[in-house]
Image (spheres, helix red, strand yellow):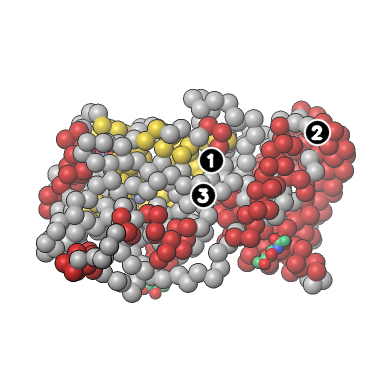
Amino acid sequence: MGIMSFPLLIMILIAFPLSSSGGKWTYDGPVGEHHWSRNYPYCGGAFQSPINFQPELLRFDPDLQPIQLQDYNLSSKEQLTLSNNGHSVQLSLPSRMHLSGLPHRYSAAQLHFHWGSSNTPTGSEHTINGKQFAAEMHLVHFNSAKYPNISVAVDKSDGLAVLGIFIEVGEFNPAFDQFLKYVNGIKYKGQKVQVAGFNIRELLPARLDEYYRYDGSLTTPPCYPSVLWTVFRNPVSMSLRQYLALATSLFSSQAQESAPMPLFGNYRKTQLMDNRVVLVSFQQGWGLHGATSVASPMQRTLVIQQLLNGDLADLADGGLHHLLPKLQRKPWAVKNWRNNPKQQRLGQATEKHQKNKDLDTTGNNPSVWKNTHASSYMGMFGINDDALCFVSLEKNVSVRLRRHHADAQMSQALRKAVFPELNLKSYLNCRSDLDLQTIRHLLRSRPTDEANELDQALTKVSQGHKQRSMTQYQGSALTKLTGQTQAAVLKNSHNMVPTNHRLQPMEWED
Ligand SMILES: *[C@@H]1O[C@H](CO)[C@@H](O)[C@H](O)[C@H]1NC(C)=O
Ligand SMILES: *[C@@H]1O[C@H](CO)[C@@H](O)[C@H](O)[C@H]1NC(C)=O
Ligand SMILES: *[C@@H]1O[C@H](CO)[C@@H](O)[C@H](O)[C@H]1NC(C)=O
Ligand SMILES: [Zn+2]
């Protein structure tokens, strides 16, 4: 309180100069995380990261494939840039390194760390049921199939894929020493050194098949909600000495600044869930809340692509169930399907076409389409579609087009409006993903025999089982959950897509 003394005012102006490009930010103090949204509106928006992986939010998804790392073994002749950007230690990565098994090719850009202080080694960003680890590493990748570089991808809803790795203090980790031994050369903000390439795979946990998956954001300003997060279940270790190298060697200030500011505690608090769920690739160890699961954004993308351009026979047998509410699968549904000669024909076509699919080199992983629940989706139409999928984007598009008597433009509108928003859509917890009406519209734009057969089969099954399941599921946990979600979705539908914030080219880390 009181009038600020002149030297103090000068100090504050030096420490926090007004900036034209979005502004300086820190984790604490007057430009700390609580104030980020003043200069970076997305930080105060929806779908932010990190989050706490609470058991109630987790949904087992049997279709999540192990993460596949490509070209991660770098030659020692390759030079990587290790830098201090004032917020973290960052190691540049060549874009040849990439992830496969996702719907797009995601190329590597950089990795960096978040950590605690020297006396409180709790600095991970994500937490597992409230447990915070000592540190967290982020391997940042961008959608290189769609965007020319990471600067263009960073604010797109399908722009980034980040791998998160928990770090605990324990055994010495030789992989981290490949670059941690050079941190004394980058003590101050803006400093860089070159380090020799090594096998980046060694920085990751042994098991790449156990992870949490959700849609979120950069954890630093400008906090764009553009990240498909994969956070591995199992931590890696580093020694206390290695941890202290991170926590005590670095400054967030530049070398010439008179008051050096130590760099530690560079993690953001966990954020609200905004109706999101977290898909989990493993079943043991978090309690069995996995009675229901939902399709991931990438599965939806694949299925919509298939509906628009792809092989419908494959879809009938392989992928359409991803778009439908996943409840207990009903054996009678499979039987109906198998007994219908038309549908059997579709099934045979699938096997034939699967061969071609396996040769697909466009980056789509054919294994995503193979699944053990072939045809069982037919039983899931019984649920009232409206009750499960409220304010979905495709419904919105469809309503608006119908209002303007422009049904024919459905496919194009979906391609334009729904595709880019698929990540955002999943935030709405829209559990049935595409309503039957929309699927029909899409099929109508493809006047092939296959499309007609599929459409007829869908109609038949949905009519046949609607009444039955309406009573079957009344009063179930699902109805309750649906009610809650509906309220939440309606509440949130207003600020769903922030449109009037101007994007500025700014510094960002992940
Ligand atoms: C990585 O590449 C080096 C040669 O550059 C090779 O000696 C080593 O065996 C490779 N490691 C793995 C795990 O493939
Ligand atoms: C990224 O690509 C865009 C569009 O091609 C280009 O204008 C921009 O200069 C590129 N940025 C970088 C950092 O390469
Ligand atoms: C549909 O989206 C538009 C903007 O794209 C929005 O103004 C409108 O409120 C939405 N309608 C519904 C029913 O969600
Ligand atoms: Zn990060």
Specify the quadrant of the image occupied by residue 341: top right
Is there any visible trace of residue 504 in the rendered image? yes
Q: Which label's residue is closer to the chain start, 2 or 3?
A: 3
Which residue sits at x=41%, y=49%? 162
Mark 2 highlights which residue? 474
How packed mark 3 is, by other alpha carbons closer than 10 Å (few <14, some 14-19, many 20 or more), is many
* Kind of residue indicated by mark 2: Gln
Q: Is residue 135 left or right of residue 490?
A: left
Mark 3 and mark 1 residues within 8 Å of each other at the beta carbon: no
Q: CA distance from mark 3 to mark 1?
A: 8 Å
Residue kind at label 3, given as amino acid type:
Asp
**Are the two marked residues, 2 and 1, in contact with CB atoms closer than 8 angstroms?**
no
The structure residue drawn at horizontal position 55% and vertical position 37%, both measured from the top left corner, is 57
What is the three-letter code of the residue carrying label 1?
Val
Quadrant containing the N terminus is: bottom left
Q: Where ligand 2 lies, by image quadrant?
A: bottom left
Q: Does any atom of ligand 4 lie closer than 8 Å to the CB of label 1?
A: no
Q: Residue furthest bottom?
A: 20
The residue that appears at 17% across and 44% down in the rendered structure is 248
Q: CA distance from mark 2 to mark 1?
A: 26 Å
Q: Secondary structure at mark 1?
A: strand
**In the displayed structure image, the side of residue 315 where residue 215 appears, left or right:** left
Residue at image mark 1: 278
Q: Position of residue 135 (x, y in %)?
A: 30, 40
Disc on the earlier residue, 3 or 1: 3
Instruction: Give the spatial CA distance, label 2 vs label 3.
Output: 31 Å
Which residue of the protein is positioned furthest toward the front in this rendering? 2
Return the residue at label 3: 215
Residue 366 x %, y %: 56, 45
Q: Which one is in front, 296 or 28?
A: 28
